[in-house]
Structure formats: structure tokens, C-alpha cells
Amino acid sequence: MKITILIQEGPYNHQASDSAWQYIQAAIARGHEIRGVFLYNDGVYNVNKNIEPPQGDRHIANRWQELGAQGIDIVVCIAAAKRRGIKDDALVPDTRISGLGQLAKMALESDRLVTFGD
């Protein structure tokens, strides 16, 4: 099954990012394909390369970077990013900025769209 993930909440202040990452790990382990991850609203903060969690804490931006390096398309909504002052140079590698049309394309190419966050 092909799955697209939509995350609408930022890291460390909501369970959405952690839950989405765990969901993706479980889906991949069961042989499903993650078509892509679309970060919307405060979800754009998940791939901010300036995140510096305390030692021993999970590094959420690095998690998304690692998934991007594995070939999963990690996309940041351009409008949500602009509203929050996030530009290309603030993103971790293997992620990119695009529009809502990219989310629509991912959803059309998937069997399921799973949303995390309000």
C-alpha cells in the first residue's frame, strides 16, 4: 500500500511528529511504501536545521533528514514556511519546499492519506 503522511504540528510541543515517525517506521517494516511526507502549518518546523535538542533527547529534524536520505520525499509547504520565516537555507538536507499541489499529487498517487495533528 502507498501512503502519504501529512503533519500539521511542530516538534516537541505536540505528539504529532513523534507519532508520524513511529507510524512510518511500522509501515515500512510491514512492507508499505511511504509516497511522501508533507509538512503543513507549524509542521514546517520539523525540518528546521537549527533545532538543538538537549543531549540524550531525540533529534526530530535529523529523523526526517534520515527518512529523506532513504528516498522518502519530505516536502515543506511553501506558504506555511513563508508565514513562519522558514526558507530553503533553514531546512535539513534531503527535504524541500513546494506547494499544496505537491500534497495533492502525493495523495492522488497513494492509497491512503494519514494526517497527524489538528
Image (cartoon, grey):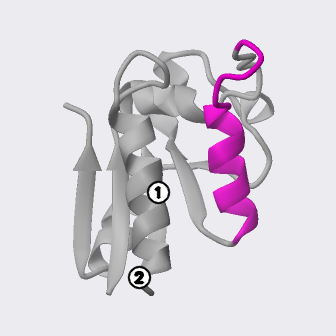
Q: Quadrant of residue 80?
A: top left
Q: Front-most of 105 and 33?
A: 33
Q: Does residue 98 appear left or right of residue 41 in this picture?
A: right
Residue 17: image x %, image y %?
A: 43, 37
Q: Does residue 54 appear left or right of residue 34 in this picture?
A: right
Measured Cα–Cα span from mark 2 to mark 1: 18 Å
Crowd rating for badge 1 (residues with CA inside 10 Å; few <14, some 14–19, many 20+): many
**Quarter the N terminus occupies:** bottom left
Q: Is residue 30 above or below residue 19?
A: below
Residue 93: image x %, image y %?
A: 80, 47
Q: Does residue 68 appear left or right of residue 28 in this picture?
A: right
- Residue at the disc numbered 2: 30
- Look at the image and give the residue range highlighted in magenta: 54-70
- Residue at the disc numbered 1: 37
Q: Front-most of 62 and 110?
A: 62
Dots 2 and 1: beta carbons under 8 Å? no
Q: Is residue 101 above or below residue 52?
A: below
Of marks 2 and 1, the one in the foreground = 2
Name, please, the residue furthest toward the front: 56
Describe the element under mark 1 as helix, strand or loop. strand
Describe the element under mark 2 as helix, strand or loop. loop
Identify the residue shown where x is 36% and y is 44%: 19
Identify the residue shown where x is 25% and y is 65%: 113
Q: Does residue 29 appear left or right of residue 116 in this picture?
A: right
Type of amino acid under label 1: Val
Which of the numbered marks, if any, corresponds to residue 102?
none
- Answer whether residue 38 is magenta in the image: no
Residue 49: image x %, image y %?
A: 76, 28
Identify the residue shown where x is 60% and y is 68%: 72
Crowd rating for badge 2 (residues with CA inside 10 Å; few <14, some 14–19, many 20+): few
Q: Front-most of 85 and 49?
A: 49
